[in-house]
């Protein structure tokens, strides 16, 4: 990575943390909201390992857009889907400030009709919200993506793996940010 790109990414992450801190005080101090920022450095390291021009990247729950913009700056064709329309506006304006072509859709990363039915029973989806599927606005179904990133809350990982197994490409890479284990990589849903 050249020095100019490294500096640009550092600036993006710093701005991302500033947005997150403002959001934490302005929104999360008053009501529950599932937006918690991922470990940007850890995600960057994982993306650098798999970086290749033209690969399609999707972020599930893209919030302020930092990771999708990071993927775009690294050369991926990058998209994000986020349920909170205000956060989508934040992400689009951050993309403009960084001359990024990252694209964002307001909606759910769950394909229409998806129902989570774990073998053991409880199919509730914790902090993952309900809403119209965002893939139509994006113009690309899940099986077009080479790399998908998500930051599940504890217990939501099996649902994200199931989603990938059922709707993703079998050779696609799924990167999940975990609270204690860094960024974990899966292929073919396992
Ligand atoms: C843990 S945060 C991760 C934010 C960002 N990906 C990151 O890693 O910094 C999860 C995000 O997913 C969003 N979200 C929750 N359910 C969603 C759904 N069904 N579709 C799209 N976004 C969703 C939340 O609003 C929140 O912004």
Image (cartoon, rainbow, N blue to C red):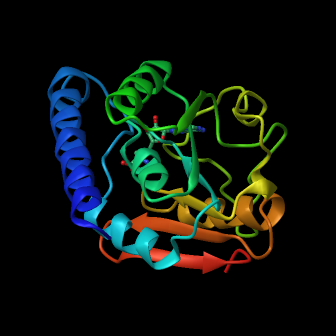
Left or right: where 46 falls relative to 179: right
Which x, y percent locates residue 174? 60, 68
Left or right: where 51 falls relative to 116: left
At 51% from the left and 42% from the top, the residue drawn is 61
Question: Which quadrant is home to the C terminus?
Answer: bottom right
Which x, y percent locates residue 35? 36, 39
Which x, y percent locates residue 118? 72, 63
Can residue 28 be seen here? Answer: yes
The quadrant holding residue 133 is top right
Question: Which quadrant is home to the N terminus?
Answer: bottom left
The quadrant holding residue 135 is top right
Establish if 93 lies above or below 147. Answer: above
**Total numbered circles:** 0
At 76% from the left and 76% from the top, the residue drawn is 171
The quadrant holding residue 32 is top left
Which x, y percent locates residue 122? 65, 56
Left or right: where 127 falls relative to 182: right
Establish if 69 lies above or below 138. Answer: below
- Residue closer to the observer: 54 or 126: 54
Establish if 14 lies above or below 39. Answer: above
- Residue closer to the observer: 3 or 30: 3
At 32% from the left and 29% from the top, the residue drawn is 97
At 60% from the left and 60% from the top, the residue drawn is 148
Can residue 39 be seen here? Answer: no
- Residue closer to the observer: 83 or 52: 52
């Amino acid at each position: 990575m050249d020095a100019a790109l490294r500096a640009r990414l550092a600036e993006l992450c710093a701005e991302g943390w500033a947005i997150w801190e403002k959001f934490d005080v302005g929104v999360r101090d008053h009501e529950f909201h599932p937006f918690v920022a991922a470990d940007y450095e850890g995600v960057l390291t994982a993306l650098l390992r798999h970086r290749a021009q033209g690969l399609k990247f999707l972020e599930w729950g893209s919030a302020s857009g930092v990771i999708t913009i990071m993927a775009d700056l690294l050369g991926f064709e990058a998209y994000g889907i986020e349920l909170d329309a205000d956060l989508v506006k934040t992400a689009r304006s951050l993309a403009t400030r960084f001359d990024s072509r990252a694209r964002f859709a307001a909606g759910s990363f769950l394909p229409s009709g998806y129902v989570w039915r774990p073998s053991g029973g409880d199919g509730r989806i914790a902090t993952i919200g309900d809403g119209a599927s965002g893939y139509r606005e994006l113009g690309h179904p899940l099986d077009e993506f080479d790399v998908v990133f998500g930051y599940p809350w504890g217990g939501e990982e099996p649902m994200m793996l199931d989603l990938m197994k059922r709707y993703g490409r079998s050779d696609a890479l799924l990167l999940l940010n975990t609270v204690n284990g860094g960024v974990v990589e899966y292929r073919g849903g396992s």
